[in-house]
Image (cartoon, rainbow, N blue to C red):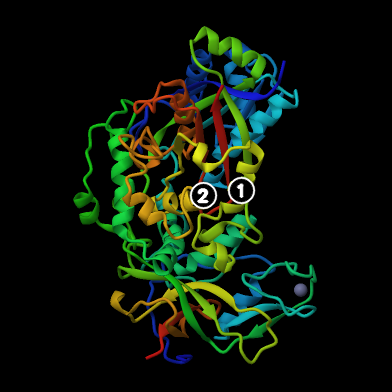
Amino acid sequence: MSRKAHIVGVGESQYTKWGKIVDETEHALAHKAIIKAVTDAGLTVDDIDGLASFAEDRNEAIFIAAELGIPELRFGNMVWMPGGGGGCAAVSNAAMAVETGQAEVVVVYRSLCQGQFMRFGHAAELMVNEGGDEAAEPPPITFQQATTLMLGAMGHVMPFGMITGAAAFALPFRRHMHKYGTTGEHLGKIAVAFRKHANRNERAVMKDKELTLEQHQASRMIADPFRLFDCCMENDGACAVVVTTEERAKDLAKAKDRRPVEIVATVQGAPKGYSFGSFTNANIDDDIYATGGTEQMANRLWEKSGLKPEDVDVAQIYDHFTGSVLMQLEDFGFCKRGEGGDFIDSGALDWEGGSLPTNTSGGSLSEAYMHGLNHVLEGARSLWGESCCPVDNAEVCLVTSAAGVPSSAIVLQAK
Amino acid sequence: MNADSNQRWFPNSMPAPMVDHHTLPWWEACAQHKLTAQRCTNCNHTQLPGSPICSECRGTDFEMTELNGKGTLYTYTAVHQPLTYEEKLPFFIVVIELDVSGTPCKNPVRLMSNIVDAEEEEFEIGKPVEVVWETFSEFVSVPRFKFVK
Ligand SMILES: [Zn+2]
């Protein structure tokens, strides 16, 4: 029987506003999510033989494996697509390990306590020059040594104040507005659609907070055109996804009365010369600048999967910022380039009546910011009929990772 | 140009440039108030920031070619969230398409920077801009841009 990779279990810790989890460490949260995910699959920790993560997760697989008492670690993998670009790539690497026989059961996890460590939205606080002793003559401002390629790239733009994702991804979206007439109201409709889904989701940080388009439009500007509600949250929590072979998946799914969910195709990558995308790179090709940078990758995904955008019943699109959702919808061919605004206006993303129910658990804007791995959990749940916003007879789900940086995506199909 | 005026727009607490062997020459030219780009002497492909290799011909010989300091606004954002808690808000992060006319550079090159001395209403993609220099120390000057009036 086939070793084709499937998702068989998902699990997460509680999700909270950043800084709320103080009595548990980040790696303890990772354990919690991993145990919940294997339990959900009908497996135990003793069945795990591979671990994969991304986004420079601080909780290295070797320590997680040792602490959990995993009998033998046969696969440990970290993705190089940066930050939230790597979530689907981590699932992709788990699938490769399983399909090539390097491991049988690989758990993909992401644990993130922004309160215990650094809030991504406030990374600048570590980088700004110290004021120093006011009485003493301050030393002259001079260069700092970039000790990594990433710091070299960031070090070229930080003197201009480029440090937050909001500013980094506002730049390409501003150009999209200029080229195609897209508006802040289009962005608001995305935020409102996802919030409605989160209002039905017990796990969502924003479960009890409603959001109207008027509230969105009145919210404070962060990096024009992105307002507060265009930006993802900053959260504490952990989540995990279990990947194994078709052979095992069929039995496990039967025991849970679920349809097996196959990872039909996976892609990761970046266009030529993209480096860290719009964060550090002002010289992205003009054709690509006002996009999510994921069109080439999307075309490969459709080709590999034998599926088309029209086949997708439900989508989980990475939403660090609303504008990136709109541009990815164009990249993946759900509408033509420049028509993302009209697509949003049609109500396409809504669970109720939408042609492409999207981020059915609320996404990073309203469920939790787990660097997009929670989108993969929701992708599996949406095909098992276990979503808070279940889509009738959903068979195909697209899950994407961050736009505007090197990224990844997967297509899941219930068989 | 304001080489001697020592005008300031941002506080000293802004992040200083973080450099390596390949990006340092550009910042050293900035300290002389020269706006440059890294040009491959083999194929004239021009790139920023500086790199050890030309991404077009894979040549490894370069010149820092001085540009005329003019350009056009490619895209922008008004940042309303404080970075250092000392700067004036909003401030504007922009991408400038630099004019390479009069040089052997074979492609225009873009630079992330700031527009200063402008109101939000003045921003329009494609508008002409020119460089102004902000001197932090004898080592560090940062190129910002103004709209050409
Ligand atoms: Zn060359």
Residue sitting at x 71%, y 76%: B45
| Residue type pointed to by label 2 | Gly
Q: Is residue A147 visible?
A: no
Point out the image quarter for the C terminus of chain A.
top right
| Residue type pointed to by label 1 | Asn
Q: Position of residue B12 (x, y in %)?
A: 41, 71
In what quadrant does ligand 1 lie?
bottom right
The reply to whether label 2 and label 1 mark residues of one chain is yes
Q: Nearer the viewer, residue A408 or A15?
A: A408
Disc 1 beta carbon < 8 A from ligand 1?
Answer: no
Dot 2 or dot 1, earlier in sequence? 1
Residue sitting at x 63%, y 20%: A244
Find the distance from the CA under tag 2 to the CA under tag 1. 8 Å
Say above or below: A342 vs A42.
below
Judged left or right of residue A353, residue A145 is: right
Q: Position of residue B36 (x, y in %)?
A: 61, 82
The reply to whether discs 2 and 1 touch (Cβ–Cβ < 8 Å) is yes
Question: For the residue labelled by badge 1, is the local secondary structure a helix, a strand or a loop?
Answer: helix
Farthest residue toward the front? A310
Judged left or right of residue A336, residue B120 is: left
Q: Is residue A392 visible?
A: yes
Per the image, the residue denoted by label 2 is A333
Judged left or right of residue A261, residue A138 is: left
Q: Residues within 10 Å of mark 1 (few under 14, many from 20)?
A: some
Per the image, the residue denoted by label 1 is A299
Q: Residues within 10 Å of mark 2 (few under 14, many from 20)?
A: some
